[in-house]
Image (cartoon, rainbow, N blue to C red):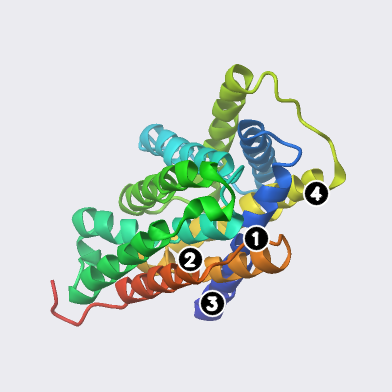
Amino acid sequence: MSHRPLIYAAVVLLTLIWGTTWGAITIGLEGFPPLKGVAVRFLAASLLLLFCGRLLGWPLRWERRLAFLWPVQALLTFALPYGLVYWGEQWVPSGLTSVLFATLPLFVALFASGLLPEERLGGGGVAGILLGFAGVGVIFSEDLRALGGPEVLRAAPIVLVAPLASAVAQVVVKRWGRGLDALTLTAVPMGLCGLLAGAAALLLEAERPIVLAPAPLLATLYLTVAGTAITFSVYFWLLSRLPATRLSLIAYATPVVAVLLGTLVLDEPLTLRLGAGAVLVIGGVALTARPAPRGAG
């Protein structure tokens, strides 16, 4: 029986959910300081996954390579990228953050070409990377202060480290995590991320209390269940069935959803230059993900 319809449905599900998480992070930050928000989200998601795995009889596997893969996942898939995204979205509009994170496939293509022999870059891939980063250049040629003050100009470049770190982890898991199930690849690293973020919050956010208002609570609950436990389980299930570069295409569809929601629901600014840069980034990602001609590379 073909998995293709299920794969298509999973890709659409991830696109829609991850397209809404950027705005949900902005809402969640109204009640949760960044590190505390990350800690609550990933600790709760880890416990939820472990509970569901136990309930459904899914075993949590242990192999020696997990001593390497779990810390990589905890640090580079979860803690560093989401710590930076949450920190950045205190000032950077959610739509702009999603566009910056959409560079993920460009970084994946660069790293995969060196570590994954089956995913060598062709001429189209190189052109796509150049086009995508040209789009980033167009975005940063905008007066970012007009999008939310001088802090946006300071925070936006730092947010770009998030997709870079995530790309390293994705390629590492693709190469050395073959055969591992989604629960094994996600549950424990999410818990480690939550503990790490919680420890950092005790040191850096001791004077910033959590405000238990309805909107931030609901946003954080949504991020925990839909935006983390469900999506990352589906994502790593897909990663074992699709090329890493092709799967990272999800990152170019989510900004469309995120920018629309940010503009229409959160009243975030959308300038012509930001829109043009986003189109170039998305176009570059689409070009990068095109299959190379047979015999190329």
* Type of the residue with mark 1: Glu
Give the position of the C terminus as an image quadrant: bottom left
How far apart are the two marked residues, 3 and 1, measured between alpha carbons? 31 Å
Residue 208's spot in the image, x, y percent? 70, 25
Q: Earlier in the sequence, mark 2 or mark 3?
A: 3
Q: CB of mark 3 within 8 Å of CB of mark 1? A: no
Asked whether the residues under the numbered discs 4 and 2 touch, taking CB atoms below 8 Å apart as contact, a structural biologist would say: no
**Residue at mark 2:** 274
Q: Nearer the viewer, mark 2 or mark 3?
A: 2
Residues under numbered marks 4 and 3 in contact, where contact means CB atoms less than 8 Å apart: no
Whichever of labels 1 and 2 marks the residue nearer the N terminus, that label is 1
The residue identified by callout 3 is 8
Image marks 1 and 2: residues in contact by CB distance under 8 Å: no
Whole-percent x, y for residue 259 in the image: 59, 66
Disc 3 on helix, strand or loop?
helix
- Circle 2/circle 3 CB separation < 8 Å: no
Identity of the residue furthest to the right in this view: 214
SS at mark 4? Answer: helix
Res. 69 image quadrant: top left
3D distance between C-alphas at marks 1 and 4:
21 Å
Q: CA distance from mark 1 to mark 2?
A: 12 Å
Residue bearing mark 4:
218
Q: Which residue is mark 1?
A: 268
**Label 1 secondary element:** loop
Q: Is residue 157 above or below residue 15?
A: above
* Image point (23%, 77%), residue name: 292
Residue 87 horizontal/vertical position (percent): 56, 38
Instruction: Looking at the image, tell me whether mark 4 or mark 2 is earlier in sequence order.
Output: 4
